Amino acid sequence: MSKGNSVPKKRLKDLLPTPEKVLESRTLKLFAPQLSDPRLWHFNRHSLNKAVYIGVLSAFFPLPGQMLLALIGALIFRANVPMALGLTWITNPLTTLPVFYTGYYIGAKILDLPMISLRTIGRMISDLSLWIISNGANPFITYKGTVSLTAFCLGLTILAIITSIVCGLGFKTIWRYKAVTSWQKRQLSSSNKPPKL
């Protein structure tokens, strides 16, 4: 690995979880034998770029299990595990409502279905969370006829694929730019040094 790549690499290492932090999760600990592969922790451009595609794509999975999906993707494609897991947090309590609303909007437009309100989607997310973690009402029954699950899934899938591609290409571009500018600075610095006598 050239020094040119060390600038973005160092910043990413500071931001992403360590292997020890990843294995604190009871679910992810089940994969400890598979996670012993050092390629899954490499901070090189190829490993990280694959992780961007996987992590962003997994972030749009509408149920809990996004991190597990990202981990499985990272294991299959030998991508950087911390990066893939970290990017699943694109969808979080602050962003879930607008992401799901946009996904439903895309699906409804494609299928020529009426749009539902932001409030309905908010209630759906809340009910889905309660249904999964406790014994709340099943939202797939409660909202049947009001909400199109097909529109929701289609829209989210399209949004996930597009966002994943844009983020993956954006990451590759930024990494290359940082590496090139870092190399140019070093070249300029070494050419300005006085010659040794």
Image (tube, grey):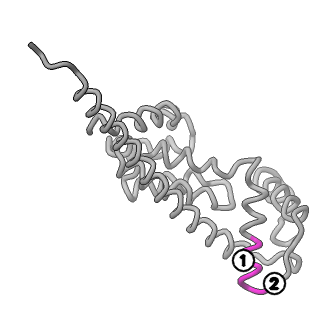
**Quarter occupied by the N terminus:** top left
The answer to whether residue 142 is magenta is no
Q: Amino acid at mark 1?
A: Gly
Looking at the rendering, the stretch of residues picked out in magenta corresponds to 104-112
Give me the disc on residue 150.
Answer: none
**Most frequent secondary structure within the magenta stretch:** helix
Q: Is 142 on the left-hand or right-hand side of 106?
A: right
Residue at (67% x, 54% y) in the render? 64
Query: Closer to the N terminus: mark 2 or mark 1?
Result: 1
Q: Residue furthest left?
A: 197
Q: Is residue 195 above or below residue 78?
A: above
Residue 175 in picture, x, y percent from top left: 41, 47
From the image, tell me which residue sits under label 2. Answer: 113
Q: Nearer the viewer, residue 23 or 77?
A: 77
The amino acid marked with disc number 2 is Leu
Q: Which residue is mark 1?
A: 107
